[in-house]
Amino acid sequence: MRFDVITLFPELFAPFMEAGITRRAYASGQIELKLWNPREHAEGNYRRVDDRPFGGGPGMVMMAEPLARCLHAVRADRAEAIDVQAPAVLFSPTGEPLRHAGVQRWAESRGAILICGRYEGIDQRFIDTCVDVQISLGDFVLSGGEIAALALLDAVARLQPGVLGEEGSHQQDSFNPALDGLLDCPHYTRPELWREQPVPAPLLSGHHAQIERWRREQRLLLTAHQRPALIDAARAAGRLDARDEQLLSSISGTL
């Protein structure tokens, strides 16, 4: 799997590759990451990559030609190295919100070319001509696409075999189909009593079925309170049983 990142700030990615659990995905070669600076494909002494917007307005706009040349260089390098036509992905507020299912698809792919915009945006002609997919992290605006690219890379890396401490531990993550798309339950560790707050008794019981039922109930309660749309989705998919529905019915008046 190979990801190429087009960014004006490649230095932002180095610490990410060298620290934390997900570094294992890069150290092992499961994910190859290459960084490309569009300034290296710009013309003139100043290697200019932005200009004022037509029609006026604040800020600057990234120019189409340096990005197009950079993208062409990326595609040529990928064709020579792995012969895989990867989609060009732009992080943008207009894109489809990134969710677990999308991360799972990228984690099972051969990679992509991630384009990180800056300033007021990118010349629309480049987007119309060269971009295959647009992704959003949510209904807010960042100063650049680098943080969004790092978020996607982190989410993909932790799904690779052997990256996490325990194989399959990501299946207990919030939104995972293994949890029926619900939020994960609360977690506790030592000491058993902290500031007069005890660990819930079922977790200390040693009774596996009791512990699992407590966790299921907590996932349902937390999701119903915080993200009720996820309960609706689980119900529509037939993932809730009669016992689940009985619990949800008992709290319906408190939501």
Image: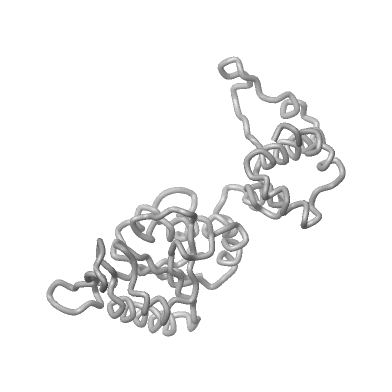
Q: Nearer the viewer, residue 25 or 179?
A: 179
Outermost residue on the right side: it is 242
**Image quadrant assignment for residue 202:** top right
Relative to residue 223, is residue 206 depicted above or below? Answer: above
Relative to residue 209, is residue 87 drawn left or right?
left
Relative to residue 241, is residue 49 depicted above or below? Answer: below
Outermost residue on the front side: it is 55
Relative to residue 7, is residue 227 depicted above or below? Answer: above
Relative to residue 68, is residue 43 drawn left or right?
left
Q: Nearer the viewer, residue 253 or 187?
A: 253
| Residue that appears at 77% across and 56% down | 236
Picture coordinates of residue 53, whole percent (x, y): 26, 70
Picture coordinates of residue 41, whole percent (x, y): 25, 77
| Residue that appears at 57% across and 61% down | 103
Q: Nearer the viewer, residue 50 or 210?
A: 50
| Residue that appears at 63% across and 48% down | 173
**Image quadrant assignment for residue 130:** bottom left
| Residue that appears at 45% across and 48% down | 20
Outermost residue on the left side: it is 45
